[in-house]
Amino acid sequence: AKTPSRPSHMPSAPAAAPRPPRISDRKTRRPAPFPVKAAVLFITAGGVLGLIAGLRAALDPDRPAPQAAAQLAELRVPVETILSLARVADVAVAAVAFGIFLLLASLVRDGRSWARTGACVVVAAALFFGFRDGSFVHVAGALLAGLGTGLAFMPASSRYFATHGGRTA
């Protein structure tokens, strides 16, 4: 009977380095067409203008007290406290709106076709609130984002979205 061979104590060839884990399962992309790139810039610029308008409104020293101030004054809440809470709320709303614009711009760049529809809804809401408040800067930001949203519906952009953001196999 044969005895099994003994393992060799000779060093073997080094093992291949393990591949690093993939951060994303995204497939390779073709570059986005110009209208999509411009749409992303315009949507982001609209968000920046909205943020600036919100911060300006929050920091306005001549800002009148909110309508609820009279009711809160009956409860002995100082007007300064009401104004400071309103300012904090304005900054928070402006920051959240800016984040929504950035998120939608990123998703448009990713080729998510539903992000175009979401951008339409957000632009319509921004226009409504801008006209309601009489804020020229809010309206300008919403129109800028609306221009970007319109660019996302151009034929070259639609082809890009139809291929799920230019993903290739």
Image: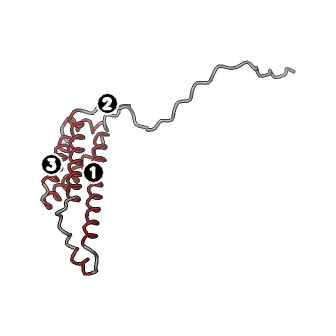
Disc with the residue nearer the chain's start (1 vs 2): 2
**Residue at 20% over, 69% down:** 65
**Residue at 28% over, 70% down:** 81
User: Pointer 3: what residue?
Assistant: 143
User: Pointer 1: what residue?
Assistant: 98
Type of colouring:
secondary structure
Front of the two marks 1 and 2: 1
Q: Amino acid at mark 2?
A: Arg
Front of the two marks 1 and 3: 1
Instruction: Place residue 1 in its image quadrant.
Output: top right
x and y, in percent, of residue 2 in the image: 85, 20
Disc 1 + disc 3, Cβ < 8 Å: no
Mark 1: which secondary structure? helix
Camera-nearest residue between 38 and 24: 38
Real-space CA distance between mark 1 and mark 2, rounded to the nearest whole angstrom: 28 Å
Which of the numbered marks, if any, corresponds to residue 30?
A: 2
**Residue positioned most to the bottom:** 74
Real-space CA distance between mark 1 and mark 3, rounded to the nearest whole angstrom: 15 Å
Camera-nearest residue between 137 and 61: 61
